[in-house]
Image (cartoon, rainbow, N blue to C red):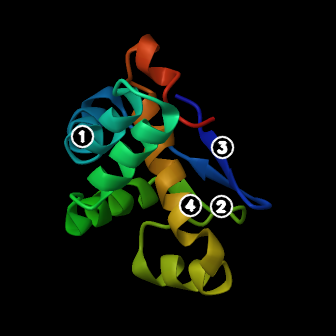
């Protein structure tokens, strides 16, 4: 599979996709952690009611589980200088100068990695 590109602000990062075998535990983790929260998007009701459902469910997310997902995703992310963010020194050096990109990059990387193996009907629910 070819590298994907995610853009955060003016920075373009490359994301190395998982192999199908690697995608299984990652996909299951994403579904377990983020699925209940994202279910609020497809609940019935007005847009305001659905957004309220999502916001109320965010409080139930286990921070350590999300941290684990972000670390798994960051192990596949490369800076514009082709530096992999899989080790602490590279990660800290990069985000020391790009602090405002830290969380957005992590979440976009998770979604980029997770969408590879989603059924076609669910791909429309993910951000572009």
Left or right of 18 in this view: 22: left
Q: Residue at x 20, y 62 (%)?
A: 62
Q: CA distance from mark 2 to mark 3?
A: 12 Å
Within-10-Å neighbours for mark 3: few <14, some 14–19, many 20+: some
Q: Residue at x 57, y 85 (%)?
A: 93
Residue for badge 2: 82
Q: Nearer the viewer, mark 1 or mark 2?
A: 1
Residue 8, horizontal then vertical, whole percent: 68, 58
Left or right of 93 in this view: 74: left
- Identify the element where label 3 is drawn: strand
Left or right of 5 in this view: 62: left
Q: Are marks 1 and 3 in contact (CB under 8 Å)?
A: no
Residue for badge 1: 36
Q: CA distance from mark 1 to mark 3?
A: 27 Å
Within-10-Å neighbours for mark 2: few <14, some 14–19, many 20+: few
Residue for badge 3: 5
Q: CA distance from mark 3 to mark 4?
A: 14 Å
Sequence-wise, the earlier of marks 2 and 3 is 3
Q: Are marks 2 and 3 in contact (CB under 8 Å)?
A: no
Q: Nearer the viewer, mark 2 or mark 3?
A: 3
Sequence-wise, the earlier of marks 1 and 3 is 3
User: In this rendering, is residue 117 above or below 90?
Assistant: above
Q: Can you see residue 45?
A: yes
Residue for badge 4: 104
């Amino acid at each position: 599979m070819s590298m994907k590109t995610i853009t955060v602000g003016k920075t373009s990062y490359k994301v190395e996709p998982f192999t199908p075998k690697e995608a299984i535990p990652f996909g299951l983790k994403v579904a377990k952690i983020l699925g209940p929260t994202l279910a609020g998007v497809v609940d019935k009701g007005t847009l305001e009611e659905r957004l309220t459902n999502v916001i109320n469910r965010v409080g139930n997310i286990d921070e350590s589980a999300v941290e684990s997902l972000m670390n798994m995703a960051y192990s596949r992310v490369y800076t514009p200088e082709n530096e992999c963010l899989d080790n602490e020194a590279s990660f800290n050096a990069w985000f020391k100068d790009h602090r405002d990109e830290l969380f957005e990059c992590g979440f976009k990387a998770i979604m980029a990695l997770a969408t590879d193996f989603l059924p076609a009907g669910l791909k429309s629910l993910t951000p572009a």
